[in-house]
Amino acid sequence: MDDERRSPAGHRRSETSRGGGRVLALIVAVVLAATGFLGYRGELPGWTPFSESGDAVVSMSRQRLPLDPIAVAWAVEPALVNISTTSHPMGLGAAGTGIVLSAEGQVLTSHHVVKGADTVTVTDVGNGEVYNATVLGYDSNADIALLALDGAADLAVARVGSSSTVRIRDEVLAIGNAGGVGGTPTAIAGSITDVDSTIVALNAADLSRKSLSGMLEVAAAVSSGQSGGALADRWGAVIGVVTAASGEPPADEGLQPNGYAVPIDTAMRVVAQIRSGTPTETVHIGPTATLGVLISDAKPSGARIDMAIYGMPARAVGLAEGEVITALDGDVITTARALRAAINVRKPREIVRLGVTGVDGDQRTVDVALALGTPN
């Protein structure tokens, strides 16, 4: 069987398989919940109204130039990185892509690429160097994360564009570490088919589902490993962060697979929040803190402990399955989401006071020192 394939940009890459225990970091859009009505904006690109003589007058300022996949890929690829992660104790790994934002090694990627990772290793496409990476912060709701590469300097930096001017039928190029095999990124050309898609995304690594809105939809066969990669316009500017694929539709339906990307304006707002050092309910900054519990909504209120993980803080202080956390540092906890949000702005080793209702209905308070967790 042929073990090579050629991308539309003329790039050939190896599809050699790797060892077991590796998961490609791509989330698959399983439900298209809402789209614009074909994104029609009432204009014909590149043309002005007819003149009095009846001749069509072409507006050169609005004329759309054709995308050159080879030139765009050549411009963007040096500012991309291949990302590899490992998670303990199972030793599972994931692969994805990142976009270099600064010469000193700040890298933009998808949150799901680094979710649950104990270690993150990055190979820079521009110089071939390998770096250990630290997660500076993330917004799981927007599926965006910011990394810092240890010891990086003088890296090629991506040209960041704006997603506010993206229109239906714009030609774009999705570039990333397709297949998670590293090496030269694969470039897939396509056109924008929606600028405000809402999808339900399935994370191939842990099978979790998440609703993502405001997404750019592109008619291109985005594939595993391209998550966190660049969606670039005809001028080589990054206008989106590749996040999801629609999967392969049945052949008898004659449909083309789609890809989805977080608009770059949305991604850079998250980056700016992380750089500010101020966490929010959705934006986590710095190392992740954890209680070491699996939780769900309690009835009528609170966060029910479904499992207290061995060796983690909650179990160490005697919290057990079936108990309900009702308060944290005096603030009422009504849902599992509320507890996660409260922990999201804390730091490892920080001590929090929990209000707990036992399975027998008895209430007590417990002081717990949070542990270092993984991006969640």
Image: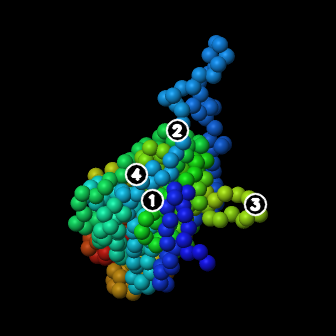
Q: In the rendered image, is residue 376 in sight?
A: no
Judge whether 231 appears above or below 133 on screen: above
Within 10 Å of disc 2 (Cα), the crowding (few <14, some 14-19, many 20+) is few
Amino acid carrying label 2: it is: Leu
Tell us which disc is closer to us: 2 or 3. 2
Q: Which of 73 and 230 is in front in this view?
A: 73
Is residue 292 rendered to the left or right of residue 359?
left
Whether pointer 2 and pointer 4 mark residues with C-beta atoms closer than 8 Å, the reply is: no
The disc at residue 229 is 1
Residue matched to label 4? 75
Residue 46 locus on image (x, y percent): 57, 31
Judge whether 158 appears above or below 46 on screen: below
Distance between mark 3 and mark 4 Cα atoms: 36 Å
Q: Give the mark, 2 or 1, whose residue is nearer the N terminus.
A: 2
The disc at residue 253 is 3
Q: Residue at x 45, y 59 (%)?
A: 229
The disc at residue 285 is none
Residue 50 locus on image (x, y percent): 64, 19
Tell us which disc is closer to us: 3 or 4. 4
